[in-house]
Each structure stands twice: as structure tokens, then as C-alpha cells.
Image (cartoon, rainbow, N blue to C red):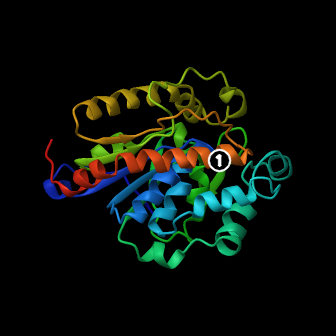
Amino acid sequence: MENLNFSHTTSEFNNKTALVLEGGALRGLYTAGILDVFMQNNIKIDTILGVSAGALFGINYKSNQIGRALRYNLKYAHDKRYMGLYSLITTGDIMNREFCFNKLVNELDPLDFKTYNNSNIDFYAVVTNVETGKAEYIEIKDAKESMEYLRASGSMPFVSNLVEIDGNKYLDGAISDPIPFKKALEMGYKKIIVILTRPIGYYKTKSFMPFGLVYKKYPNFVKTAKCAYINYNNTLDLIQKYEKECKIIVLRPSIKVRMKRVEKDLNKLQKIYDVGIKDCNENLEKIKAYISKSVEF
């Protein structure tokens, strides 16, 4: 595992493409639909930066497992071992650690670890260091070995225990960098595809969740969390600026699907996935042309 903190601006990245994946809990099935179309059409990405659900569903692209994310979410949505109130009450985690990050990935619907680890795609999961309040970008080279970082990336505040790895404490990467577009720019990428899980026009509002009360031992985290909506909205504005200048491609839901973070309605899970399929197919030729060209800016 590597914590990525560097800046490149050289032309070596002109022909490479970075894929930025927003989180959004089970709205991330929109992203899963897009990635399945990518795999079906042999669309090659060089680097992925995924946050929360973006990371958890994005690994299926690197392991080349079409349909896996939708399949296990439909199958286990109503299984109390998967995620929800039962898991939260019994374990302190809304996503059951043993079920989601062991039994599911190793036995019930196994991640193809061999294909993942042999892929030449660079994959980074964004986590939030609770003590510093800053984002860390962890390179996931070995998926089995790094499963705790993936869990940390999707561990939502208030409904998750802190994830401790090598003496550091982590929570949801979306708190510190919900859409790691700036990081992709900092890395030097000129071709960037951003997948958002909210429709156009969406902006976050100030949160009144009791971060200061629950996380009073971690003032840096509290400060970051309270400003998260500002960071999110500023990043959206920057993305839209680059999009209008035709420098990047942005995919976002063309149809609004109202979903809970832990959605149990199978029709809604299927619907948001299908919107991803539809939106990607409608932009497929544009995406192929964009990836194939060399750009400078």
C-alpha cells in the first residue's frame, strides 16, 4: 500500500486517462452500470481514484467482473448479515465487516483477486485520516491485503467504527475529498473522466450532524467534516468549468432516482444501475474518441 502525495505536470500523462469515482452509498450502482459498459466495450483506463462506494464498486472494473456489484447487492439487500440496522446494533458498523469484507469477497461472490492484482491499472482509494482530518490516497495493489483500506474508504461517520490500520485511524474518504478531481489534476492527468452519482444542479448544504459531539477527540476531523459541503461544492464548480471547456468528460445521472443510503428497494437498485448503463451507452463514442486522443492544457 502506498499513500500517494505527489505532483506531476509532465507530458507523460498526456495519453493516459484517469477515472474519478464519487461515492454516494448505493447510488454508486450508477457507477457500477457505467463500469460494466466500459468492460463490455473494452474501454481501458490507466488510473482510478475512487471514494467510498466509488472505491468499493470500482474494484470490479480492475478485476474485470461484469455485473458483480449489482448481483450481490440485489441478492443480499435484505440479508441482515449484509448492511443495515441489525449490523449497526450488533457490531457498530452499518456495513458488516465480517460479511462484506470477508465472507462476500472470499466465498459468496468472490472478487477475482488474481485478475485484480495482475491488472496494470493503478487504483487509489481515498480515506480520511481522523487525527489529521486530511485525505490520504492509498494505492490498492493487492486487493486482499488492502481490504481494510477499502473498508475505511466507505466507513460513514456516526454509523461506523473507526478503522485502525498501522496505528492510523480512518473513516469515509468522502469527508475530506468527496470527488478527487483536484488530485487527478495534481497527478498530472490531462484526460479525466468523472463519474458523479448526483444529477446536474445538485449541491450540498451545510450539515448539522453533531460531529463536534461525537468526534470531539478529533478536532481536525471535526473541522474538515463541518466544511465538507464547501469543499464538495467548490469541486463541483471546478469540474463544471473544465467540462464546459471540453477538457474532461463528466457522467452523472440523467434521471433522478430517490434512494436511501442503505436502500432495500430492489427496483430502485436496478433502476439506478440501468440509468448508468443508459447514460454510458449514449456517450460511448464520445468516451472512446476522448480516450484515444492526446491532449494538452
Residue 52 at least partly seen: no
The number of numbered badges drawn on the structure is 1
SS at badge 1: helix
**244 in relation to 180, above or below:** above
**Looking at the image, which is closer to me, 15 or 166?**
15
- Specify whether 37 is left or right of 96: left
| Residue receiving disc 1 | 269
Q: Residue at x 52, y 31 (%)?
A: 224
Q: Quadrant where the C terminus lies? A: top left
Residue located at (72% from left, 70% from top): 103
Q: Residue at x 82, y 45 (%)?
A: 85
- The amino acid type, in three-letter code, at marker 1 is Leu
Q: Position of residue 183 (x, y in %)?
A: 35, 45
**Could you say where residue 120 lies in the image, as x and y percent from the top left?**
35, 71
Residue placed most toward the observer, 145 or 120 = 120
**Residue 134 visible to an observer of this rendering:** yes
Front residue of this view, candidates 175 and 204: 204
Q: Where is residue 18? Give x, y as percent.
A: 32, 53
Residue 197 falls left or right of residue 88? left
Whether residue 29 is situated above or below residue 246 in the rendered picture: below
Residue drawn at 44 percent across, 38 percent down: 252
Image spot of residue 69 (x, y percent): 59, 59
